[in-house]
Each structure stands twice: as C-alpha cells, then as structure tokens.
Image (cartoon, grey):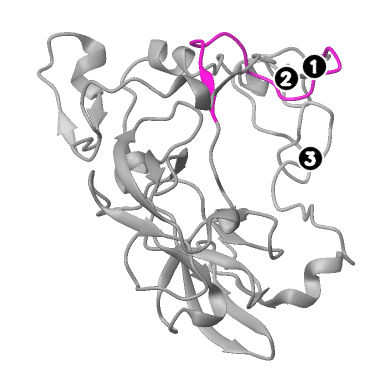
C-alpha cells in the first residue's frame, strides 16, 4: 500500500493500492464504450437505494464475460486498464482475427501475454476453459452458473473460486463467502485470481473522494426525530430502547434477518452454507 506525505488532513489518512500492473498513458477504446446514465439510486423516479447521487461521469466498458464464441482463437494482451465501473482491472485483448475486446484481468497478466479460450488448455492466468477439464485445487474466476450464460461468480478485485471436486456432471466450488456450491461441469471459468487484491484495504482519506464515487452522506437514525426513524427522539443520547434490536427507517428488524427464499430453486446446488459471522 502506498502512503502519502501529510500535506493536508485528507492526505494524512489516505492510502493507495499498487497500480503498477496498469499500462501508462492509455485511453479506453471508443468502440467498446457505452454512455452510462446516472440513476442516483432511483427506479421509476423513486429512491430505492438511499445515499446515492452525484459522483464523477463515467462511461461503461463493454466486457466479454463469455468468450465462448472465440473457442480456439488466441488473443494478445494490448493493455491493462482501470475501469471505473468495477473494482478489478480490465485487459484489452486483440484476437488473431483482428477483433478487440475487454476481459477481466487476473493477477500476473502482463502486456504482450497470449490468452486463449478452449475446451481444454494450459493452466495459465487468463486462459478460459470448461470446469470439467480444470484440475482439483485450481483457483478460477468469472465462473458461469449456467453454461453459455457468461461469468457470474468471482468478478470483483482479488476474488477467486477454488475447484474442490468434479463428480456426477457437476463441479464443486468453494466460493469467497465459504459456501460450497455445485455448478455444471460444462460451465466455463478463467484460470487465476483477479487483479487489484489491495482494493479492499484502500483508505479514501476524505469525504470528497466518497462523493466522487457517487456516495452521499448517511445520517444516523439516533440523530433524527421520532417521525423520521424508530431510533430517533429522546433526551440526549438514547439507546435503541425496549425494541428487540436495531430497526430500519421503516420499522423492520435490521440485523440477523434471513432474506433468502425458503424454497429457492437453487438450494439443491448448495452443498455447504456460507459461514455465519
């Protein structure tokens, strides 16, 4: 982690993760950019996610999460770039047929490296293949839940999934949460661990950087009045009171509530539940 000279109060606390993997002085490819409209936490005009809004303008990078239509065609890494829409880095690759695409960049991937998507290939970071051909114990990322659908699991900075077993047409995977889950063996996964693992330990240092990310201030419920929050009111600083525990602004229990459906269709694929905190 990089620290800074304390020339301002914000700089004193601020830390920055190592970005030496990034290619310097590279602009994103225009043909793979899309305009991204800021919604400020709203759905159909109503706020559904609080404390969102503002932030820096950003364009969406079109990422190839599948790669299945490029089976057997190798690609060369042209640059490794920052993506404002995700925590990990992305790599711009050029296929042998001349097409350019963005893919998620794993650790150890460098400019000039060649990667390939195939039914079975070498265990090189960035290569993509079927789970049934990946040896037990290998760490993978961008894993498909349904074959051909595109990667859904392990897509954020420093994340990976470990292949534990292949049996009965399914691969058993240990997810970052600790859950052990079955995924069809014909699903595809990329070899390696995703880039920028230090992202989780970054300290923003000042409120302004939070605002650049589009995150607005959060007011404590205990600082509000009774009509605005169940924790509000009282003389001086008051605890939650006679309630069973902390409440949401709408009076529902805030902690320890199970939100998963009791009879979810995918329950049968979960071998072991995630660890409880």
> Looking at the picture, how far across and down is residue 36, in whole percent?
62, 18
Residue wearing tag 3: 243
Residue linked to disc 2: 232
* Cα gap from disc 1 to disc 3, whole angstroms: 14 Å
Q: Residues within 10 Å of mark 2 (few under 14, many from 20)?
A: some
Would you say 33 lies left or right of 7 here? right
Q: Position of residue 118 (x, y in %)?
A: 49, 68
Extent of the magenta region: 43-61
Tag 3 secondary structure: loop
The residue located at (53%, 62%) in the rendering is 71
Reading the chain from its start, which is encountered first: label 1 or label 2?
A: 1
Q: Is residue 52 above or below residue 261?
A: above
Report if residue 135 is visible in the image: yes
* Category of crowding for the residue at label 1, using alpha-carbon neighbours closer than 10 angstroms: few (below 14), some (14–19), many (at least 20): few
- Secondary structure under tag 1 reads loop
| Residue 110 located within the stretch drawn in magenta | no
Is 45 drawn above or below residue 167 in the view shown? above
Sequence order check: which comes first, mark 3 or mark 2? Answer: 2
**Residues at marks 3 and 2, CA–CA distance in whole angstroms:** 13 Å
Per the image, label 2 sits on a secondary structure element best described as: loop
Give me the C-alpha separation between circle 1 and circle 2.
4 Å
Magenta segment, prevailing SS (helix, strand or loop): loop
Q: Is residue 89 visible?
A: no
Residue at the image position 51 percent from the left and 23 percent from the top: 31
First reached walking from the N terminus: tag 1 or tag 3: 1
| Residue 186, image x, y percentages | 64, 74
Q: Looking at the picture, how far across and down is residue 200, in whole percent?
A: 38, 42
């Amino acid at each position: 982690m990089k620290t800074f000279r304390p020339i301002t109060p914000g700089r004193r606390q601020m830390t920055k993760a190592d970005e030496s993997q990034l290619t310097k002085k590279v602009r994103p490819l225009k043909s793979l950019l899309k305009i991204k409209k800021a919604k400020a936490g709203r759905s159909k005009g109503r706020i559904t996610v609080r404390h969102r809004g503002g932030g820096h303008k950003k364009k969406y990078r079109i990422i190839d999460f599948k790669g299945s239509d490029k089976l057997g065609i190798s690609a060369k890494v042209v640059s490794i770039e920052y993506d404002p829409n995700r925590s990990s880095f992305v790599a711009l690759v050029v296929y042998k047929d001349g097409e350019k695409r963005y893919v998620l960049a794993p650790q150890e991937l460098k400019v000039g490296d060649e990667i390939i998507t195939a039914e079975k290939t070498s265990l090189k970071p960035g290569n993509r293949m079927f789970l049934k051909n990946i040896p037990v114990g290998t760490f993978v990322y961008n894993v498909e839940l349904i074959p051909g659908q595109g990667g859904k699991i392990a897509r954020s900075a420093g994340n990976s999934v470990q292949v534990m077993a292949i049996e009965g047409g399914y691969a058993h995977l240990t997810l970052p949460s600790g859950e052990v889950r079955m995924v069809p063996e014909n699903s595809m996964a990329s070899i390696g661990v995703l880039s920028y693992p230090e992202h989780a330990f970054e300290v923003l240092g000042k409120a302004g950087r939070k605002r650049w990310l589009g995150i607005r201030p959060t007011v404590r419920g205990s600082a509000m009045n009774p009509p605005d929050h169940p924790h509000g009111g009282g003389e001086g600083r008051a605890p939650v009171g006679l309630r069973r525990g902390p409440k949401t602004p709408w009076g529902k229990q805030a902690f320890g509530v199970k939100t998963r459906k009791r009879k979810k269709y995918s329950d049968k694929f979960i071998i072991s539940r995630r660890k409880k905190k």
